[in-house]
Image (spheres, rainbow, N blue to C red):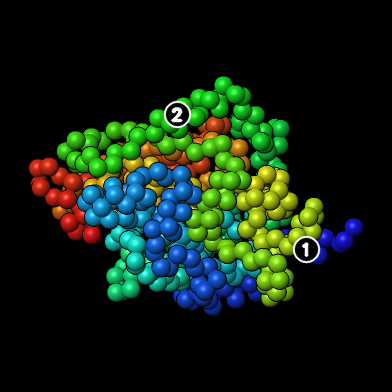
Amino acid sequence: MADIEKGKLAEGRLTPELIKEMEGKKGLMLRTDNYLNNIDVTPMSIRSFANGVGDWNPLYRDEKYAKESVYKGLTAPPLYVYSILPAAPQFGFRGLGGFNAQNEMHFYKPIRPGMHIEPTSQFKDFEIKEGKAGKMVFEHFEQRYEDQDGNLICLFNQMNIRVERAAMRKSTEKKTAPKEKKSPKLELPHPWTDEELAEIEKEILSEELRGDKPRFWEDVNEGDELKPVIKGPIGISDMVAFFLGGATPVRPFGHELVVKDKHKHPAWYFRDPETYAIEPVYAVHYNKYAAKSQTGIAWPYDVGIQRHCWQGHLLTNWMGDTGWLKMARAEYRGFVYLSDVIKVGGKVVKKYINDEKEPCVDIETYAINQRGQQTMPGYATVILPSRDMGTWPLDTYL
C-alpha cells in the first residue's frame, strides 16, 4: 500500500511568526483569478444557480413570466453573487482548519442577463480569541461586486474562524462524547423512517411563493411568521447541484492540473486513502476522510454559503417580486451533515420607515435541524411596496 501519510491534511500551528506575518498583510487586495465564475451573466447561469439552491421561482427561469413582471425580463436571485466570487480566496494561516462563520450582504442593484460583474476581495483584519478549541483566529474580508459601468451591485462582509486541526478534532470528540447527555444523539446518517420521509416531502410540496402578488408594508405586522422552506435530507447530488451552479469557493482541477497545482500548493490538498486520488481540502463537504481529518467526525457536511442561499430562498419567497432584499446576514453554527433536514423560517421583528423614507421590515431567521438545533441564526431587512405612500422599491433599485 502506498504511503498516504504524506498526503494528509496539513497540520499547521498558530505560531508567533505566523501571526506577525499575517499582521503585515492587513489591507491586502487578494488575487481572485482562480475563484471566479459567472462574471458574465446569462439566463443559463441564473437557472443553474437557482437549481442548485432548489429555488423554483419563475422570475429566475421563465422568460415569459419574467417579461410580464415588474423586472420586464429575467433576473437573478440576490445571493447569486455567491456564484461569481463565492468567498474570499484561500489565503494565509497555512495549515490551519477554517470555517466560514458569518456573512453579511448589502444589495444595491439587481443582476440581469447581459451584465458583466467585476468582484474584488480584500483582507481587512483579524483578531485572536481563546475558545473551546484553543486559540481561534477571526478573519475579516470584504468583497465588492460592480457592474460594467462601475455601479456597486453588492457589498459582502465575510468572517472566518481558523483553528489548529488537532485542537478542533479534540474539541469535537469532547463535544460528542457519551457524557454529553444534554445534546441530542448524533447518528450519521440520520435514521429516517419511511413515514418521516413522506411527511418531509409533503411539507416541501406545500412551499408558498408570493410571486407577482404584492405584499404591501401596511399588511405586515411585527410577529408575523414566514412560511418555512424545507431542505433535505441533504445528499451528494444536492452538493453537486450547488457546485454546478457556480457557488463553490474552490474551483477544482482535474487530472494533470490537480497534480501541478498540488506541487505549487501542497497544503491545499491530501491524498484519499481509499482511492489514492488527490483531493482538495474543500472535499470535507463530500469526502469522509477529509471530514474526519478536519472535524474528527467521518461524515461530510454542507457549505456555509449554501445555507445562506436557503435563507435567501425563504426571504424572496415571502417578499414577492415587488419587494427588495436590502440586507441579509447569516451565522453558521455547527454543521449540516449529509442526511440532515433543515427547516428555514423567520419572524418579522421590526416594522419602520428608514432614513431614506423606505418602508422596511426586519426579519429574524432560523435554520433548525431534525435534532432541534439552531444551525443558522440570521437577520434581514426587506423593503416592501407601500399602498399608502404609493412607493415601489424597484422604482429606486432597478
Q: Position of residue 100 (x, y in %)?
A: 53, 56
Q: Position of residue 7 (x, y in %)?
A: 78, 63
Question: In the displayed structure, would residue 20 be above or below residue 291?
Answer: below
Q: In the image shown, does 363 or 162 lie closer to the viewer?
A: 363
Note whether residue 298 is visible. Answer: yes
Q: Position of residue 54 (x, y in %)?
A: 46, 44
Under mark 2, the amino acid is Glu
Label 1: state its secondary structure.
Answer: helix
Residue found at the very far top of the displayed protein: 195
Tell me which residue sits at (71%, 48%) in the image: 288
Q: Position of residue 163 (x, y in %)?
A: 63, 58
- Between the C-alphas of marks 2 and 1, the distance is 44 Å
Under mark 1, the amino acid is Gly
Q: Is residue 203 left or right of residue 223?
A: right
Q: Residues within 10 Å of mark 1 (few under 14, many from 20)?
A: some
Label 2: state its secondary structure.
Answer: helix
Q: In the image shown, does 124 or 237 lie closer to the viewer?
A: 237
Q: Is residue 376 left or right of residue 130?
A: left
User: Quick one: quadrant of the C terminus?
Assistant: bottom left
Per the image, the residue denoted by label 2 is 203
How many marks are shown on the rendered structure? 2
Tell me which residue sits at (33%, 64%) in the image: 153
User: Quick one: quadrant of the N terminus?
Assistant: bottom right
Which is more foreground, mark 2 or mark 1? Answer: 2
Per the image, the residue denoted by label 1 is 7
Q: In the image shown, does 134 or 303 lie closer to the viewer?
A: 303
Residues tagged 2 and 1 counted as in contact (Cβ below 8 A): no
Note whether residue 80 is visible. Answer: no
Tell me which residue sits at (62%, 68%) in the image: 93
